[in-house]
Amino acid sequence: IINRIRLLFCNNKSSYFCFYQMLGFYPRDVRIYEQALLHKSIFVLSEQGHQMNNERLEFLGDAILNAIITDILYNGFKNKEEGFLTNTRSKIVQREMLNKLAVEIGLDKRIKSSAHASSHNTYNMYGNALEAFVGAIYIDQGYKRCKKFIEQRIIKPYIDLEQLSRKDVNFKSKLIEWCQKRKVELSFELIEQFFDDQSNPIFQTEILIEGLSAGIGSGYSKKESQQNAAHMALKKIKKSHDFVVNIFEIKTQKEETSLEQQPEIENMTEKEKADI
């Protein structure tokens, strides 16, 4: 009742009702939800003159979302081991899934961003906004209401936990697809091989994107070590904007160097070209 009375004095009733439809409850402070949908590509200042975006809320929401999903899986799969729970959680919080869920609940239509934002900046936009939205719910309503939102508005209508737990995620394929789409160089390097206490071979793979170390993974086979390294690389791409920027800076530098060398190659004799 108090929240409905507050609505009568709300300056932005349209936003208030829109968030109510998505959340299933009345927001206490609609501004925190609006900030959760401000992408860093758009320039908005707070009343104190500071730039506002959803990055801090995303940081908080990422931790809260992981904690709640862990809570749900821990209590929902009482006979499963830690490895199963970790693997299932990673399937829920992976970028592709969060992007999809954000669209399902209508966040994509509410995000404010610049039309000039580059493609590698917008790749994570929807999923990041969902994490920021979760952070906003936590600040506005607390853990219990946040968990209820995830259970009733996200998992129940859109995720079959039993089916998802049986689905394999090919992190290597996802990383290859990401690199091919952006035309960046990717390599898998076997950096070490050793044996554990039971004489089982252990492989360690490092992933390089445009020569930058993106992740290191270990496993009892080369394939497993590559999958684990790819998982780490995808996490780094998701979390580190600076890392992604560095990738494209190196790619651009290589392209510029190649263009500068092109006239020299064209003036070479056939024998000189063959010797390159």
Image (cartoon, rainbow, N blue to C red):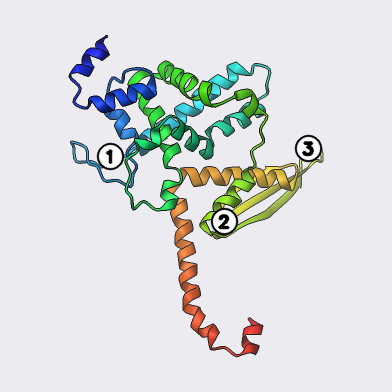
Task: Kindly check if marks 1 and 3 are in contact, taking CB atoms under 8 A apart as contact.
Answer: no
Q: From the viewer's side, name the closer residue of 251 and 27.
A: 27
CA–CA distance in space, label 1 to label 3:
52 Å
Callout 2 crowding tier (Cα within 10 Å): few <14, some 14–19, many ≥20: few
Q: Position of residue 169 (x, y in %)?
A: 64, 38
CA–CA distance in space, label 1 to label 2:
33 Å
Q: Secondary structure at mark 2?
A: helix
Residue in view at x 68 percent, y 21 percent: 80
Which residue, as the protein is rendered here, is positioned at the far right?
A: 199
Q: Quadrant of the N terminus?
A: top left
Identify the residue position indicated by label 3 in the image.
197
- Going by the numbered disc 2, the residue's amino acid type is Gln
Q: From the viewer's side, name the closer residue of 160 and 128.
A: 160
Identify the residue position indicated by label 1 in the image.
52
- Going by the numbered disc 1, the residue's amino acid type is Met
Q: Secondary structure at mark 3?
A: loop
Identify the residue position indicated by label 2 in the image.
180
